[in-house]
Image: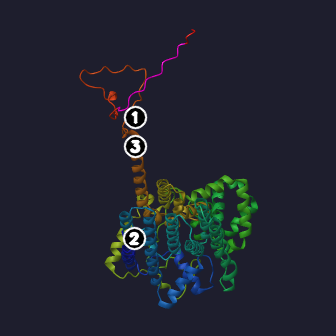
Amino acid sequence: MTSDSRPRGALTIFLVVQAILAVWWAAFHPGLFSRDSVLYLSHTMAGPWVSDHSVVYDALMWLSFTVTGDLGAVTFAQTTAMAAALTYLAQSLKALGAPRALTTVVALLMPLAPPVGAFTVTLWKDVPFTICAVAVAGVCARVAARRAVTVPALLALGALFAALGLFRANGFLVTGLAVAALAVVVRTARVRLLVVGGIAAALPLALNTMLFPRLGIAPASNTYVYHTAYGDIAVAYRERPELFTGPDLALLESVAPLAHWRDSGTCHTVSPLIWRNGFSWTQADMRASELLALWRRLLVTDPATVVAARWCRGAIAWRPEQSGVTYRFSLQPDADAYVGPGKVADFPGREVFSLRPLNAELHRAADRWLTATLEPRYDWMLWRGASWAYLCYAAAALAAWALRDRVVLAVAAVVAGQQVAVLVNISAQDFRYMAAPIVIGMLMVPLLLGSAGSLLAQGVRALWRRLRPAATPPAEREDDPTDPLPEPVPGVADPEDEPTQPLEEITQPIPALPHPRIDQDG
């Protein structure tokens, strides 16, 4: 393919993907949403502004709502950004050696899948986070293809890694882990890469602690920050109640009834603990230091219980099959179920959170397709990112082997960073927490197949070279002086006896040899 045709090919991929995602947008206009989606906007309207979620994403929703009176602008922008990220990753993988035609086909089919299409038009901060992660994988693929960490690549990685931290609270951890993985596999610019990654990881933390409070944005509540630790306490109370003293029980009861702590002590999710009636966020915020002290004591006295709870809750990161209930989408028609006393604060214009599809038939078709894929038997393939994370590692490893270059492993760095970050600290079995490995993994299938085919061909050629007969004739055997001479053939002169040149004619007389002198006396 010529260099002039490649931009046209990329533009074609982008336009087709954008068109398919626009169909999802029209079918679920202004976008799918959940309780978190309502929280993103409610505090910006009812006040005060808080940084519980993503200040940047909350501001985008506020801007769309105040300027247009709706939220469709946010979700449509997400479709365009996702189309651009998918196109960029596809083209980057082609530059790395992925089969061009197959990669194009996969990229064009991906937005038809609900984990890509329906997810992209959902009002979640996880959507731009995933888009940035896909773009990071694309930049890493370019680095691997060029065998160099260029200045533009460093700047792009710095901006994208910083965005990860601005869109999700654990983004700085994903950045740190991904940069550490990159530093191991790249051969050049390690120090610059570590510096850029460190700045990108620190920037969101600095904004949350220094800039946002000056702008009147309150820091995240203690319960929002430490709710996974509270979930560990609930699991420990349910499984090892003898570890809790009288003062411990009094502390728990000041936040929620003991029965609520016991009944909510499932290791799969913390949602029943903090979102059901009976749990006081106000008391939990006030007594956060005491609850954390209790958690630290449990970690020391019974670390197995705490670690097991984290391992169980992080199963969405490492276990392909369902563990607990995998959360995909809420699919509520409006926000009435989320707003009310003890729930999300009400605000004028709340009806913006209601499905208003642009075409009824389109909505019915998309809803049937989405609902059909929500069957639990499809979890491992569509909704649990662990399967796709492992596929990413396999594809990167085979490609690195086929190309004899470990820098190819950089493509999977952001996937590894997200998988470990989710495993260490996550609140529930939500598919969106591992959406990036799903999207990246789908596009790496052609690279996996192409690399496997290349390695197979290399193996066949090596085997053939070992097994085929030698192409050169055998070396001539040297004469052995002990061998008997061959019998002469009668009537045939031996060519070795023939003079190679005619003898010169002797024209001069041959001088007589002198006779030896005879001694007369002898």
Q: Do the residues labelled 2 and 1 touch (CB within 8 Å)?
A: no
Q: What residue type is labelled 3?
A: Arg
Name the element at disc 3.
helix
Residue at mark 2 = 111
* Residue nearest the observer in this picture, 112 or 190: 190
Q: Nearer the viewer, mark 2 or mark 1?
A: 1
Query: Mark on residue 475?
Result: 1
Q: Position of residue 412 (x, y in %)?
A: 52, 61
Q: Nearer the viewer, mark 3 or mark 1?
A: 1
Q: What residue type is labelled 1?
A: Ala
Q: Tag 1: Cα neighbours inside 10 Å, few (<14), some, or many (≥20)?
A: few
Q: Where is residue 428 in the image (x, y as percent from the top left)?
A: 55, 64
Give the position of the C terminus as an image quadrant: top right
Residue at mark 3 = 465
Q: Residue furthest top?
A: 522
* Residue nearest the observer in this picture, 328 or 487: 487
Whichever of labels 2 and 1 marks the residue nearer the N terminus, that label is 2
Whichever of labels 3 and 2 marks the residue nearer the N terminus, that label is 2
The CA distance from mark 3 to mark 1 is 20 Å
Name the element at disc 1.
loop
**Magenta span contains residue 509:** yes
Q: Where is residue 197 in the image (x, y as percent from the top left)?
A: 62, 69
* Residue nearest the observer in this picture, 330 or 101: 101
Q: Residue furthest left?
A: 491
Name the element at disc 2.
helix
**Magenta span contains residue 299:** no
Q: Position of residue 186 (x, y in %)?
A: 58, 61
The CA distance from mark 2 to mark 1 is 65 Å
Residue stretch in magenta: 506-518
Q: Which amino acid does label 2 sit on?
A: Pro
Whichever of labels 3 and 1 marks the residue nearer the N terminus, that label is 3
Asked whether residue 115 appears in the rendered view, the answer is no
